[in-house]
Amino acid sequence: MIVVLDASAEEGEILEVEVRIRGFGYEVYRSTGENCTVLSALGPPREDVKEALEVMPSVSRVVLVSPPFMLVSRAFKQEKTAFSVGCVEIGRGKVVLMAGPCAVEDRDSYLQTALAVKEGGADILRGGAYKPRTSPYSFQGLEEEGLKIMAEAREITGLPIITEVLDQHAVEIVARYADIIQVGARNMQNFKLLKDLGQLQKPVLLKRGMSATIEEWLMAAEYLVSNGNHRVILCERGIRTFETTYTRNTLDISAVPIVKELSHLPVFVDPSHGTGKWKWVPSMSLAAVAAGADGLLVEVHRAPKEALCDGPQSLVPEKFARMIDSLRGVAQIIGRTL
Amino acid sequence: MIVVLDASAEEGEILEVEVRIRGFGYEVYRSTGENCTVLSALGPPREDVKEALEVMPSVSRVVLVSPPFMLVSRAFKQEKTAFSVGCVEIGRGKVVLMAGPCAVEDRDSYLQTALAVKEGGADILRGGAYKPRTSPYSFQGLEEEGLKIMAEAREITGLPIITEVLDQHAVEIVARYADIIQVGARNMQNFKLLKDLGQLQKPVLLKRGMSATIEEWLMAAEYLVSNGNHRVILCERGIRTFETTYTRNTLDISAVPIVKELSHLPVFVDPSHGTGKWKWVPSMSLAAVAAGADGLLVEVHRAPKEALCDGPQSLVPEKFARMIDSLRGVAQIIGRTL
Amino acid sequence: MIVVLDASAEEGEILEVEVRIRGFGYEVYRSTGENCTVLSALGPPREDVKEALEVMPSVSRVVLVSPPFMLVSRAFKQEKTAFSVGCVEIGRGKVVLMAGPCAVEDRDSYLQTALAVKEGGADILRGGAYKPRTSPYSFQGLEEEGLKIMAEAREITGLPIITEVLDQHAVEIVARYADIIQVGARNMQNFKLLKDLGQLQKPVLLKRGMSATIEEWLMAAEYLVSNGNHRVILCERGIRTFETTYTRNTLDISAVPIVKELSHLPVFVDPSHGTGKWKWVPSMSLAAVAAGADGLLVEVHRAPKEALCDGPQSLVPEKFARMIDSLRGVAQIIGRTL
Amino acid sequence: MIVVLDASAEEGEILEVEVRIRGFGYEVYRSTGENCTVLSALGPPREDVKEALEVMPSVSRVVLVSPPFMLVSRAFKQEKTAFSVGCVEIGRGKVVLMAGPCAVEDRDSYLQTALAVKEGGADILRGGAYKPRTSPYSFQGLEEEGLKIMAEAREITGLPIITEVLDQHAVEIVARYADIIQVGARNMQNFKLLKDLGQLQKPVLLKRGMSATIEEWLMAAEYLVSNGNHRVILCERGIRTFETTYTRNTLDISAVPIVKELSHLPVFVDPSHGTGKWKWVPSMSLAAVAAGADGLLVEVHRAPKEALCDGPQSLVPEKFARMIDSLRGVAQIIGRTL
């Protein structure tokens, strides 16, 4: 960390800051210039130490020279994290496709969509049994009933299933059914939930919060990994910007190469929530794969116009199947399979 | 709701849309112009109906003509919501001051700060026993031990206490000690937590999410009220914008008059988190009161440079006491007390 | 346009609004529901009419049901705009590559880079003779001297040149040398400049403003087209968001398919300014082409570490040449050439 | 500046960086820790040097430890800038009120509004003769005809006038009539225009760009001051955020105390554009004055519903006069007059 002192700081004050820095276990080096004095505090970056120093009257500013995440960083672990879920390998050469409807609405329709996306080329089935809804008056999901339907779809298709958990009370039950547990954007900083999931023996897909910086997102992943769960997938799903007329969110494709450089964890993209409109999904899926995404999370619904939630962002199975060919071509160009 | 059809929509398609709208229980009126046909669907605005219509191929766009919140709106209840917490009246003429440190760190220091802010003019004591921290390695709060210290401070000062609940597991214990329960910005859309708090007999202070629109914020309050809890305080605490060098957040003072027009609920402002620096707290407190805030939530710490969290945004008790006089003057100008 | 009236509007007031709407030349249809009255005003969407109606006391809200741009819209002209600059066809099957250094710094280095990017596969040479700089103390460009060097590079390489114009005074001189004139992000709403360029017989590349909505961007293009210049290229270059640590801007790749649906104008992407770091340029270039961009604007510099401006976002010619192969592969997958 | 090197940087590379830093005229001090080496470069912060260093392969990051603006900073000039325009003192104890319609539309109506705002308490008359309009089809202002009407209003009322200049071509003519020249938000980074205005003997009011950071805003002011014009007023007018339903912009009141600490220039607030709705203007005006603004720029229109531009954000003269009393009270509380 770099501690910049006020131009007016006197020797006694500078010494006081140096003592405080050493008290946190850092080595300190001083550089004195014409206009200001700068202290270099050598040791791990810590937000709390930064805050403690910033309130000292002679301190003008504290700069963290390296990011605050550790276990999820490439500096800590150079090789990419990869693991298997059923027969599906995540984080290796193959771009993984997770597909299915936003919400599980009824048995027949879910099973039909499941079969259709399998045939279309999906590797993993998605579906929501517990739904976070902005309005208390909207459909909130079938809960355990929905999980059972998904489990049946797994039986029939042979594909692993991923579904979202909304709260700590449901962790146990969701973990009983799901192969991968999804943490939604609104829960990215639900730290208690992250801790509980960190202690679980199930892979977790962690969506980026709607207005989360890349650093905050990786710190949220650090909660999972530091609690013992190393099978974490990061998923970009669009961030909130001033453009709200034509897209629900702005899909931040640049997060893919950036996070892949900063972290060893696999990075997925959700082009359905990311844009909010099914018609942008194929082109944004292509862009995500071209940018190096390790997988996609796509909403596919047999009959989007009857969907109880997020219909506007769902592809029909035929469109999903049709876009796979182009995705495969792009994957090959950058040395991957799909 | 207004349903705008594609210019190319044919009679059969228009009829199909009209039938679907009526199926949701709305009356439909058609306006046919040279370039497009517009259907007016008369009835309550519903996000899910909007979504269901937007996927129909001949529908170009659906516009909600009135906001989706109901019970929290002025349209539903004209007179301002007001209630008492101990001897403190919230939502009436007096601007209410909630003050105290970010986190409860140890008994002595908390009690000292509590006495100092009481003397300074605070109406309610704040303090955190459970702390949401970006880093898993930061101090996470004293938990129940902290709640006990706050309860002791209430005994000594006679002031009601407010503290944050982070997760459903802690609702019961926090409710046992606190007079007002705070929902933090990161939990504003933790819908399960909101439901649980909605069923509680305790006032709730609901902070605006870091990137929540005013509409989403009021919908979150709707979760509380529609589950039975009518004693809700809204609290603006700064939103996330591109300006990150000089403030942690951008305090949206304009949210105060806007929310007061849209809703009957009392609106508070947190200038400490809103700016992230104690030196902007007095001027932003003055601005908030001038704009009509029903109260303030201010961080005050006996010795901010030793604080384990959020030191940089805490006032010392002397500065807190000193700003009260100006606040009182401004309150009087706009016909209130403090 | 849809005019939503207050629930309390009385017949006399409603009639007054209807008269005013008709006064602007619109047909009016009224829909009366239990809670509110809605007037449909049929005719072209106009911001000024919207504003004029919104100040009427009984009007609650006015909604434009179609976007305000006209000449640049697909509704006005279905077929894609395409044109030639020298031997280069823009807006047709080939993805066009514009490349070169941010600023023209000296003759030798510019000519060397020009030859290198030509060899690497560039179609058009870029370079800045007039530079918009945040600081008055930074290098501001070689001005006409720079234009002459670019003209010489055109002679040598046979490639057309594109360069930025900063102000009206320089339009004439820039037009004398350049084959395509660039309008930078900071000038996207410099309406006087747009008008002047609209009257010119030179293609214009219009960058999206740093915080411009897609609608504002297309309205800026409308200034060019409505003044007579139909050869307009739109260029996405990253928007300003809360993420400022790892990228200078957030490149909005989703703008590519959206603008291509809304408008017939060709859409380019600038991955160099869009991310601010050369190392993200190859993956974002791939993403842009995969998403359907009609071309790229890439910063390439022979020796970025000696560049007088924007060094961090420039590729060396070797890296530029190396990424072309993958770009070509992706272009083919989506049915284009490069 | 602080130059953080890669953990893997070797001695030869470190020396190379040190040589380069010294080449820019800085002293260099090295701090070597376990994980990384940090170089402190002592001297003035320069964006171009930062960029030049960041492309060196062994450099991980360069941090400017002090802001890049100079002449406008408090470090350069401690005492607040103050000056007179006619009989009006700007930047001293009195909070200055600039008021009038958005655009000058016709002689009679402008003169009437001018007289009304004078009577209401305005110190300076505002009005637009050249209007920046998003749409090429909207009313663009009366141009010189409008300036003449404003000059006549000055004769009649005795109040100085402020009006906006849109482009370099109009600088001379606007300067001939106006007492203060306004630079609009869209032109904040029109650097050529700023240079021209910097060489003028007229005060300039510089609005903050829609998405300008505080640093960029002060750098724009630096263009004016470094070119010789010291009579600069800064004006906050709302920034672009994700909240677009209830306000046109988010008025950043916190910019007032922040800029007053960073710079000696007077800071005004425009609550009319800042919110976009006249009904929020009185409360936001009170907030701005409470936060320490040196003045306000308010839209007042005799008959907003007939206004040709920005009607929705204009107060009628009666409401303007009525809010003055409360503003005066708040000004007194914080030790100012109005």
Image (cartoon, coloured by chain):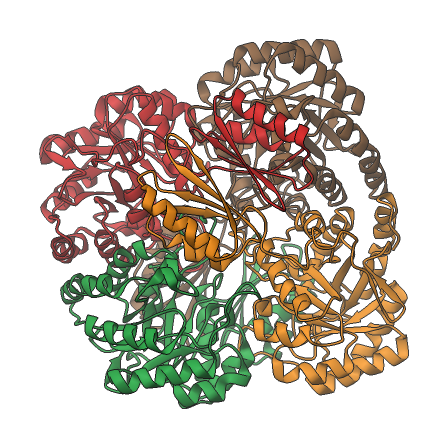
Chain colours: A orange, B green, C brown, D red
Q: Quadrant of residue D308?
A: top left
Q: Does residue D308 appear in this view?
A: no
Question: Looking at the picture, does residue C200 appear above or below residue A69?
Answer: above
Left-right relation of C31 to D158: right
Residue at 73% over, 63% down: A233
Residue at 84% over, 47% down: A330
How many tags in the picture? Answer: 0
Residue D258 at x, y percent in the picture: 32, 47
- State the quadrant of the C terminus of chain B: bottom left
Q: Quadrant of residue B293?
A: bottom left
Question: Looking at the picture, does residue A4 appear above or below residue A106?
Answer: above
Question: Looking at the picture, does residue B253 appear above or below residue B23?
Answer: above
Task: Decide which of A335, D188 is in the foreground and name it.
Answer: A335
Q: Quadrant of residue D232?
A: top left
Task: Decide which of B141, B299 is in the foreground and name it.
Answer: B141
Left-right relation of A250 to D65: right
Q: Does residue B95 appear in this view?
A: yes
Residue C36 at x, y percent in the picture: 41, 72
Residue B30 at x, y percent in the picture: 54, 67
Task: Decide which of D178, A52 is in the foreground and name it.
Answer: A52
Residue D70 at x, y percent in the picture: 35, 30
